[in-house]
Amino acid sequence: MPCSVPPPLSADQISVLIDGTATPEEHTHLSQCPYCSERLAQARALEQRLVTTLKRWDCPSTQQLGEYHLGVLSAVEERVVRRHLEECALCKAEVEELRQFLATAPDEQEQPQMILVPKTRPHTFGEVIARLIPQRSSLALRGSSREPIVAEADGTTVIVEIERTPNEQIVIVGQIAADEQDGWTGALVEVRQADLLMATARVDDLGGWQCGPLPIAPSTLRITPKEGNSIILPALILAS
Amino acid sequence: MATASLSIDGLAQRCAEETKKWNDRQGSDPQFCFELLRRALAKGMAEAFTHVYQIYEPQVIRWVQGHSRFALTGENADFFAGAALRTFYFAMQGPKFARFAGVPQVLAYLKMCVHTAIMQYLRDQHPVDVTPLEDVHELGETPDLLARTDAAELWAHICHLLPDPHDRNLARCIFLLDLKPRQIVSAYPLQWSNEREVTVATYRIRHLLRNNAELCRWASDI
Ligand SMILES: [Zn+2]
Ligand SMILES: [Zn+2]
């Protein structure tokens, strides 16, 4: 298929069309010419493929940039980030924003504007809601009158037992079992009641942890490993 | 009073009082908070961290609300406060705590975690790779570059095609930073004096890349 309105757009003109800096004449040509439109589409496909693969692939994480700014990176990491900042305008801008943010005293803060943005939560802030697995009474843990709660998320099993203390409080005892057990050592357990943080615990190297004593109330658990998704156990309803 | 002899509950009570004084702009004594933070982070005592979380969470939420990009996320302030406190918890564990001289330095780190939580969220909200690598490998008969495609190798290949550092810099602006000519001129005024210069150089780079058979195969096969 030849160009409908010859001469065909040059490679240079295709390039400015990709950049969005083309003239009205070039746009008119495009609207009248399927051949050149197809050439532009192909050029754009390569461009988009390159951008989606390469975008910020070698940028340090925001946390590394922050530690760089505060001067708490090791000498080697510091050098790598400094060199990166010499050539990356986006990271440089992020560090500058951080500098301004840290320099702002609380009462100089602008009131937050209310802009409603459609929410598409990115995967790295992932949290998985655990699925409760129904248990038969015979599986109750030793020494407990109550059945343990067993939940599963992403191949990790969480077993929780709620023990009542003599003075009408509860202690939550938990165990994590995963293929990558080491990844859970040192994980942070948070217990919330009515959205308030009531207790935290550290998962030990055998996957065990314990929180409490706490008031008797529906409790939500969040277990976060150093790397990876948090597991959430939504309000464990405590039967009387 | 020697802070080392105080219980965690005793420290937490004093730290909460001193934090309130500090917020009310009265003179405050940071030693109780510092010892509480030390036990929570350097010593990894969960009970101390619970108090740290409870005492500082309101401040962290105010920081989130005051961040210039918070409104762009559409999330609740609690969401980022939690994320920042968790990052803080893991980042400050153990010997690293010794690098911080006092409460202001530790809190600057916590405030930094607020910034990084929001910025990382916004970075991740525009997912950059639409084709998971697994899918790429499934394509079977793939040319060399495609079979081992990942950003580092692709970028090395492009650098090989663009030996001139000036061209490489521009390619970085276009493909890694996704900047338009106008943004490139304003971000790198020493290298570029006007948009036309950028456009002409960009054209040359695109021409070089489009005529590379390996790259074209890679782009059309996906
Ligand atoms: Zn045409
Ligand atoms: Zn960067």
Image (cartoon, coloured by chain):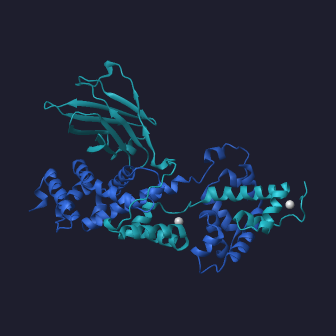
Chain colours: A cyan, B blue
In the image shown, does A23 or A12 lie closer to the viewer?
A23
The answer to whether residue A74 is seen in the rendering is no
| Count of marks, rendered view | 0
Residue at position x 62%, y 56% in the image: A53
Instruction: Give the image location of residue B186, x and y in percent.
Output: 59, 75
In the image shown, does A213 or A220 lie closer to the viewer?
A220
Which residue, as the protein is rendered here, is positioned at the far left? B1
Residue at position x 67%, y 42% in the image: B138
Instruction: Give the image location of residue B16, x and y in percent.
Output: 19, 56
Q: Quadrant of residue B114?
A: bottom left
Residue at position x 18%, y 58% in the image: B15
Q: Quadrant of residue A112?
A: bottom left
Q: Is residue A68 left or right of residue A147?
A: right
Q: Is residue B9 left or right of residue A89?
A: left
Where the N terminus of chain B falls, by quadrant? Answer: bottom left
Q: Is residue A46 left or right of residue A77?
A: right
Instruction: Give the image location of residue A40, x and y in percent.
Output: 78, 59
Instruction: Give the image location of residue A21, x and y in percent.
Output: 71, 68
Q: Reply above or below: B56 against A104.
A: above
Q: Reply above or below: B18 against A238.
A: below
The answer to whether residue A61 is seen in the rendering is yes
Q: Quadrant of residue B100?
A: bottom left
Q: Is residue A187 left or right of residue A6?
A: left
